[in-house]
Image: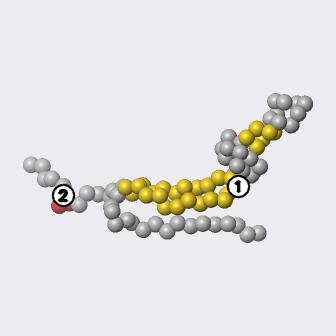
Amino acid sequence: MSEKQNGVLLTAPLFGTGKETVGYFTGYGCGYCQGTGYFIDPDIVNERVKTPCPKCGGTGKVKGIVTVDWVPDGEVKSYFKEDKP
């Protein structure tokens, strides 16, 4: 069986630190409602009342927004540390 896969290649930015949005990945079926966009309300016995999915808002689809937060990593270089007498 085939499966849709997306990937992201990260490269340190020239601007140093900060946030950047890498990409938008659309077209995934909502896992909460299995792509139907609704639920049948179990509290109403006589009728089948469809309630919009609270996760996808009734669209049946979700998208992933990948944002990377670049922050400093590791120890401060020794020549920047102050020697305390």
Of residue 20 and residue 73, the one placed in the foreground of this image is 20
Q: Which residue lies at the image location 52% right of the left edge and 66% below the top edge?
A: 8
Residue 40 vs 26, above or below: the answer is above
- For residue 46, side relative to residue 62 (left or right): right
Give the class, few, some or many, for how many residues have Cα within 10 Å of label 2's Cα (few <14, many ≥20).
Answer: few
Q: Which residue lies at the image location 62% right of the left edge and 59% below the top edge?
A: 26
- Whole-percent x, y for residue 80 in the image: 18, 57
Residue 19 vs 48, above or below: the answer is below
Q: Looking at the rendering, in which quadrant would you find the N terminus? A: bottom right
- For residue 63, side relative to residue 59 (left or right): left
- Whole-percent x, y for residue 60 in the image: 72, 50
Give the residue furthest to the right.
Answer: 46
Q: Residue tagged by mark 1? A: 29
Of residue 22 and residue 58, the one placed in the foreground of this image is 58
- Whole-percent x, y for residue 2 in the image: 73, 69
Residue 57 appearing in the image: yes
Tell me which colouring the rendered structure shows.
Answer: secondary structure
Mark 1 vs mark 2: in front: 1
**Please, what is the three-letter code of the amino acid marked with disc 1?**
Gly
Q: Which residue lies at the image location 74% right of the left edge and 47% below the top edge?
A: 37
Secondary element at tag 2: helix
Q: Which residue lies at the image location 15% right of the left edge and 53% below the top edge?
A: 82
Secondary element at tag 1: strand
Dot 1 or dot 2, earlier in sequence = 1
Q: Residue tagged by mark 2? A: 80
Give the class, few, some or many, for how many residues have Cα within 10 Å of label 1's Cα (few <14, many ≥20).
Answer: some
- Whole-percent x, y for residue 25 in the image: 59, 60
**Please, what is the three-letter code of the amino acid marked with disc 2?**
Phe
- For residue 77, side relative to residue 69 (left or right): left
